[in-house]
Image (cartoon, rainbow, N blue to C red):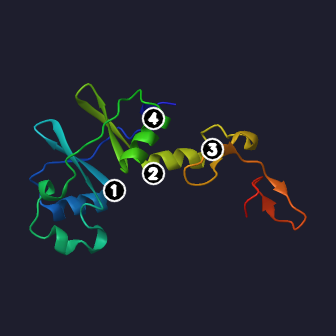
Amino acid sequence: MRIEEIMTKTVRAVSPGVEAETAWSDLRAARIHHLVVVDSGHIVGILSERDLGGARGKTLRAGKRVADLMTPTVIFAAPETTLRRAANLMRGHVIGCLPVVDGKKLVGIVTATDMLDLIGRGAERPVAESTRWTMRGRGQRRAPVRRTKQASGRVHNGSSRT
């Protein structure tokens, strides 16, 4: 599946010169968590609810502009990016959204919430339990999970460790 299939095509954008409190109001009114910061048609940053200090961030936002609080490093994705690649980008960079660009044009946005909604709806193919993988400990290789019931009734993962 490609992110163009789940992305939000109507992207909320804000100028870097807008007051931070105004941006906060826009986020709350739209019930979203991210604004793309655009200057002269170019993406220059991302402004998240967290960047604005959340509901208790009034003092953080006081007298500041979007440019003062935005994250200037933006990780992008193309519409044909796979969900797996997008999820790995977001996880690897510890970010909550990916603006989607086609060439230099902003065409959408994908958020962690979009991906969780997809999984919650069951759109992803379930993985057979016999092929699921788990980490066995720090620095150790992955191994398939084998679940068996012990005499005590507890679930045992196949490892000799307790």
Q: Residue at x 35, y 58 (%)?
A: 31
Q: Nearer the viewer, mark 2 or mark 3?
A: 3
Identify whether 151 is placed above or below 119: below
Q: Residue at x 64, y 37 (%)?
A: 125
Q: Which residue is mark 2?
A: 113
Q: Nearer the viewer, mark 2 or mark 4?
A: 4
Q: Earlier in the sequence, mark 3 or mark 4?
A: 4
Image coordinates of residue 76 in percent, x first then y, are 31, 36
**Left-right relation of 52 to 96:** left
Image coordinates of residue 137 in percent, x first then y, are 60, 54
Q: Which residue is mark 3?
A: 142
Query: Label 2: few (<14), some or many (≥20) within 10 Å?
Result: few
Residue type of the residue flagged with mark 2: Thr
Q: Which residue is mark 1?
A: 33
Residue type of the residue flagged with mark 1: His
Residues marked 4 and 1 touching at CB (< 8 Å): no
Instruction: Give the Cα distance between marks 3 and 1.
Output: 35 Å
Q: Earlier in the sequence, mark 2 or mark 4?
A: 4
Residues marked 3 and 4 touching at CB (< 8 Å): no
Who is closer to the viewer here, 12 or 150? 150
Who is closer to the viewer here, 116 or 162? 162
Q: Residue at x 36, y 46 (%)?
A: 93
Q: Earlier in the sequence, mark 4 or mark 1?
A: 1
Q: Nearer the viewer, mark 4 or mark 1?
A: 4
Residues marked 2 and 1 touching at CB (< 8 Å): yes
